[in-house]
Amino acid sequence: GVSGGSGSPGSGSTGGSTGGTTVTNPTTNPPVVVNPPTTTDPTTPTTPTTPAKDTTRPTVQWVAANGTNTTNGTGTVHVGDTVYLTLKLSEAVTVSGTPTLSLNDKGTASYVSGTGTDVLQFEYKVAAGQNTADLAIKTYNLSGVKDLAGNALDLSSAPYQPAGTLAVDTKTNTTAPQVQWIAATGSKLQNGNGTVSAGDTVRLSVNFNDVMTVNGTPSLSLNSKGTAKYVGGSGTNTLQFDYKVAAGETAADLEVSGYNLTGVKDRAGNAVNVDGAPHQPGGVLAVGSTTPKDAFAPQVQWISTSGSGIHNGHGTVGTGDTVWLSVNFKDAMTVDGKPTLSLNSNGTANYVSGSGTNTLQFKYVVGAGEKAADLEVSGYNLNGVTDGAGRSVNVDGAPHQPGGVLAIDAGSRSGATDFSFGNRRTVGYPGFQESGASLTPSTSTAMSRLALLDQYAASSFATPASTSTGAAQGWWNNSAQTLAKPQA
């Protein structure tokens, strides 16, 4: 049979021992419907606001100095030195016109760069007479400096003193500058050597021991009778002069005959001292028709004198004395022949030695009647004197005056006259025959004042003699004249 089960209709359960499936009612509610979002009406556009005009004036924030002889704004500058002044502004500016800075040493710094930025550069070159213990800005002259909105600078609180201590000193140097050397250059020249003629140009470079400034038209007078005119070099230590050779201008070796340097000064304002300045450029530069056959010919450099009674070229020599003349050349010389030197005393110096060296020796024995207040060479007779290449001496421009003052005085021996007795010669005769005596032996006699080189005895002098001393010599040689030996 079937087990009975209990159940009630509609309970959702199946009776019986095996049970039945229970049906559950749905528990999920249907979705809630949400209302759509509310749409906001668009707002009315706002009218843009006009920006306020920039009326703020730019200001100077700081000043800095740098340049020649300046470190971190500190140093000492002199004439010709350059100082750069830097202005730092509160904003970028533009520059029109020529702004400047007046300085407390009476100098002026001029604008050089910086427009469109907030940093402006000014340059100041120190001039003679400008001095201060510490450089500062005295006045800002910046009317053309404005910001991008057109506002001019507000200088009410601008700094005037750059950092550091920068002294400007143009008083310290009182030493006059000097010429150190001269050099000649040109299209026809090599190392200063060559030959130029009418129409050619020679550049003369004059070097100084300091930086020079030029105001005016300095020039150089030349031994060719030409003039070299200044063309450039101010602000350096070498000035340039140009010489254009004109017709009729000649020189065996070009040199400066005169410095015309008015307006040429050093950085401290000192004019040039030309005492002792060189006048001869290096090399041999011939101008015009008087060119030597060989522009490289040897030349005389100096002459000196020596001898007994001569000290450093000074002294007085008389008849019979010997003077040695040393003639120095640039090159070693060889001698073939008998060169001589004509002298202003009317004497002649004869070559004795020196061939193969650059100094030749000449000997001059002073003759009776020869005189000169200061001995000098009046003429070089150097035929046969040549250098190693066989070139003859160029004596144009050669020195003629030895150093010192050497007087030639044939009467320096108290009027002494030398006489010869056969092969004997007197040391000197310090006077003439006694008063009343004549040169005619038959009419007078004389007391002897002769000092002989050897012992003498009372004897007559009937010996032949030279006639070089004229009538007086004949008087002493006459057989009627005797020399009495004093009694002991």
Image: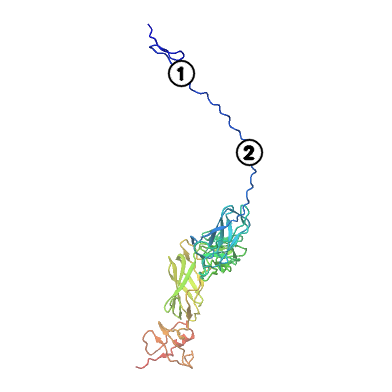
In the depicted structure, whether residue 29 falls above or below residue 182 = above
| Separation (CA) of disc 1 from disc 2 | 56 Å
- At 37% from the left and 84% from the top, the residue drawn is 454
Q: Position of residue 16 (x, y in %)?
A: 39, 11
Q: Is residue 466 visible?
A: yes
Q: Quadrant of residue 478?
A: bottom left
Q: Quadrant of residue 213?
A: bottom right
Inspect the image, locate mark 1, and give the three-letter code of the amino acid beneath it: Thr
Q: Position of residue 302 (x, y in %)?
A: 47, 70
Q: Which mark is residue 43?
A: 2
The residue nearer to you, when weighing 188 against 327, is 188
Number of dots carrying numbers: 2
Q: Position of residue 396 (x, y in %)?
A: 53, 68
Inspect the image, locate mark 2, and give the three-letter code of the amino acid beneath it: Thr
Q: Which mark is residue 46?
A: none
The residue nearer to you, when weighing 410 against 273, is 273
SS for dot 2:
loop
* Sequence-earlier tag: 1 or 2: 1
Mark 2 Cα-neighbour bin, 10 Å: few <14, some 14–19, many ≥20: few
Q: What residue does disc 1 label?
A: 24
Q: Residue furthest left?
A: 488
